[in-house]
Image: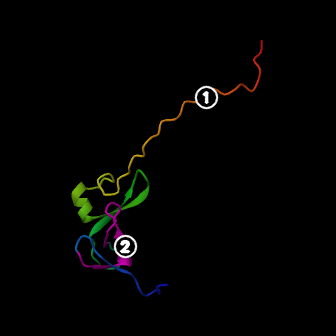
Amino acid sequence: MASEGSAVTFRCAVCGEPVDERMSAACNWCDQRYHLNQRNDIEAKDCGQVWIDEQYMALQFACNNCLADGGSEPSPTKGPRQIRQMPVRPRPAARPRPRRYRRRT
């Protein structure tokens, strides 16, 4: 188990410099780490953005590479993680079920 003082180091997808896990975020579209200053009392590098998605009421993280490809807000369908449609199997014809009660005459 890692101690509290040590942190995993990644390589920033935008600038290529090493980035500490605590001072980075994972892009929602390319799944790569990038510099993101999550504190406003420390001067640090930002290689992407984070914003609140009003439709889903969730934080969206995007690196500058994905933002440059898609304008101000990247589209989830542009990224490598597209949702595949599952093949639909035709349902077999339903057999008529026997009546549980007698018809009234």
- Which amino acid type is shown beneath numbered disc 2? Gln
Q: On screen, 78 above or below 26?
A: above
Residue 38: image tag: 2
Q: Nearer the viewer, mark 2 or mark 1?
A: 1
Q: Are marks 2 and 1 in contact (CB under 8 Å)?
A: no
Res 28 → quadrant: bottom left
Q: Earlier in the sequence, mark 2 or mark 1?
A: 2
- Percent across and percent down for residue 36 are 32, 72
Using a 10 Å C-alpha cutoff, classify the residue at mark 1 as few (fewer than 14 neighbours), some (14 to 19) or many (20 or more): few
Quadrant that contains the C terminus: top right
Q: On screen, 23 above or below 99?
A: below
- Percent across and percent down for residue 92 are 53, 33
Residue occupying the far top of the picture: 105
Does residue 85 appear left or right of residue 17 in this picture?
A: right
Residue 67: image tag: none
Q: On screen, 19 above or below 82?
A: below
Write the residue at 45% across / 40% down.
88
Residue 95: image tag: 1
Number of numbered discs: 2
Q: Secondary structure at mark 1?
A: loop
- The front one of 52 and 78 is 78
Tell me how far mark 2 sits from mark 1, CA to CA. 61 Å
Using a 10 Å C-alpha cutoff, classify the residue at mark 2 as few (fewer than 14 neighbours), some (14 to 19) or many (20 or more): some
- Percent across and percent down for residue 40 are 35, 75
Q: Which residues are magenta?
A: 16-35
Query: Can residue 43 be seen in the rendering of this structure?
Result: no
Write the residue at 31% across / 63% down.
30
Residue 21 is one of the magenta-drawn residues: yes
Write the residue at 32% across / 51% down.
77
Q: Secondary structure at mark 2?
A: loop
Residue 2 is one of the magenta-drawn residues: no
Query: Can residue 92 be seen in the rendering of this structure?
Result: yes
